[in-house]
Image (spheres, rainbow, N blue to C red):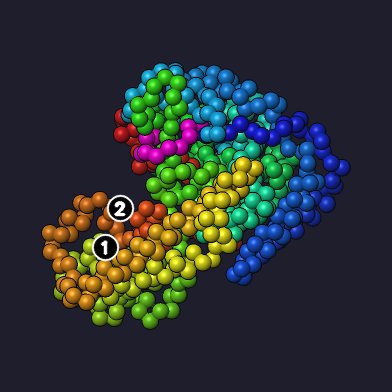
Amino acid sequence: MGKKSRVKTQKSGSGASAVVSPKEMMNLVSELLQKCSSAAPSAGKEWEEYIQIRALVEKIRKKQKGMSVVFEGSREDYFSDLMCWAQYSGASCDSFTVANFGKEGYGLRATREIKAEELFLWIPRKMLMTVESAQNSVLGPLYSQDRILQAMGNVTLALHLLCERAIPSSPWQPYIRTLPQDYDTPLYYQQDEVRHLLGTQAVQDVLSQYKNTARQYAYFYKLIQTHPAASKLPLKDSFTFDDYRWAVSSVMTRQNQIPTEDGSRVTLALIPLWDMCNHTSGLITTGYNLEDDRCECVALQDYKENEQIYIFYGTRSNAEFVIHNGFFFQDNAHDRVKIKLGISKSERLYAMKAEVLARAGIPAYVKVLLCQCGRSFTSEELKDYLLGERAINKIFTLGNSEFPVSWENEIKLWTFLETRAALLLKTYKTTSEEDRSMLEKPDLSLHSRVAIQLRLAEKQILEKASASGRAKRLHFQKKLEEGAPLPRYEESDIALLENADSDAKLPIILRKLEEVEEGQEIQVDEHSGLLNGGKAVYGTDIRESWGHRRTGSSTSRWTKKDGVR
């Protein structure tokens, strides 16, 4: 998964600017923390705040120039050490090697024929960098006393990675030396490259990611310099913003959930060697074997000798790939766009709607979203779902779009989507044709190209969504005008709902929703133009995470016997 570094390496301390006094640096960092911890800017002022935060960060980076730890040579120089360490540690290394695949960067190349679903790769727990290994490391004393570290596993992993990088005798040195020296996440974008994303639905997450990272850096810089439990950390004398940005991006592009040793809960981990696999479309093929205590991966498809071995990172949008992984994936069947909504609990029928959804087993974090635009219940309809004949059975039809509440409700829903998508298209500063023209320029930077690709993809999705909304609206208007009866359900239908494909039968704005809270967003699917699931928007707390589960591993695939099912 990495790419060959494009940055010239230098020894730690070389090229450093004039010595900066600890007091001067602490003052700058304190100013950054105060700026990043202030109240969220008013609507339309986010870019202005980003520029101000970035200016402070650049001032700090300039004074820290040459202070970061950088390894001699290139990543490629250390791949042989990585393979030797993996083999010594009990990992499987006889089916592949690490190779350079040009624009895709480094990845795994098959050294023999591998059949689809064949177990070809396993990595034992002792090779993994986890929150637990961090607790047992030099970071442990600080972890035990800092609530932020305890609450944010991804930040713990980032600091764990930095500490081990600074310790020459660390058992993870063969792994750490093969990590990229820089990344293509938006944290590495120039300001003009970020500017290409203005007006997109993804820009808020990009700006929030930068703000969160800057705030966390400032917080931990002060903590490392002042907390007694941090006195022995190898970061005490050198903890730069570039260090933290690198660690954040390393973790963000690679972290994954695995079970703890006893299988009782999940924890975050970096999985050496396996995380070299690049992404393609397919299915999750990685799991965790608790009996053998190792991460295992089966082949996604047949591979011939010398072919690149891919895994599937999951059903991510291109916005998620760009923000959390640093690349744009062409022909992404799972691409979608967030549509943000303002929700008020003061609505007259809110309590009744919430009760209906609660009885349907729909999580509380979805209630507000559905109350606003998913099912526009009237008072009488709500009473029917709560108190009417066969109300208990009828509640379950809320989970299936084949049983609309009313034709009027469907018309309202699709009118909303059609109108909202059309309005959002008018907010972009360029047309789709202008974006395509810009992408033809040969001198366009990689980051600018990715940003414009994402911008264009959003427009294409919204265009499809608006057209789909119109078609659906006209369809249901015709049903209403014809006086067509609403689809009826019988008790036997409930069993069919329970046994049907879960993703297809969920209401359109419920699919793959995670942690959506009040005032947040829904998403529009690329191909169908339908509403899809959402992700939580960043807020302002120091504990907010830039983290994102990286790749094609699923905690649902744990097993105590046969490895990956």
Expressed as whole percent of the image width and height from the top left, the position of residue 91 reads 46, 23
Q: Which residue is mark 2?
A: 503
Q: Is residue 269 left or right of residue 194?
A: left
Question: Does residue 118 sit above or below 422 in this rendering?
Answer: above
At a point 51% along the width and 40% down the height, the residue shown is 255
Viewer-proximal residue among 403 and 143: 403
Query: Which residue occupies the foreground of this view, 549 or 313?
Result: 313
For marks 1 and 2 on the same chain, the one whose residue lies earlier in the sequence:
1
Residue 397 placement (x, y as % from top left): 23, 64
Q: Quadrant of the C terminus?
A: top left
- Is residue 315 or residue 34 the one in the foreground? 315
Residue type at mark 1: give it.
Answer: Ser
**Residue 401: mark:** 1
Residue range in magenta is 275-288
Q: Position of residue 106 (x, y in %)?
A: 54, 29
> Could you tell me which residue is drawn at 73 percent across and 37 percent down?
68
In the shown orientation, is residue 115 left or right of residue 494? right
Task: Tell me if I can see residue 316 in this picture.
Answer: yes
Q: Position of residue 151 (x, y in %)?
A: 54, 51
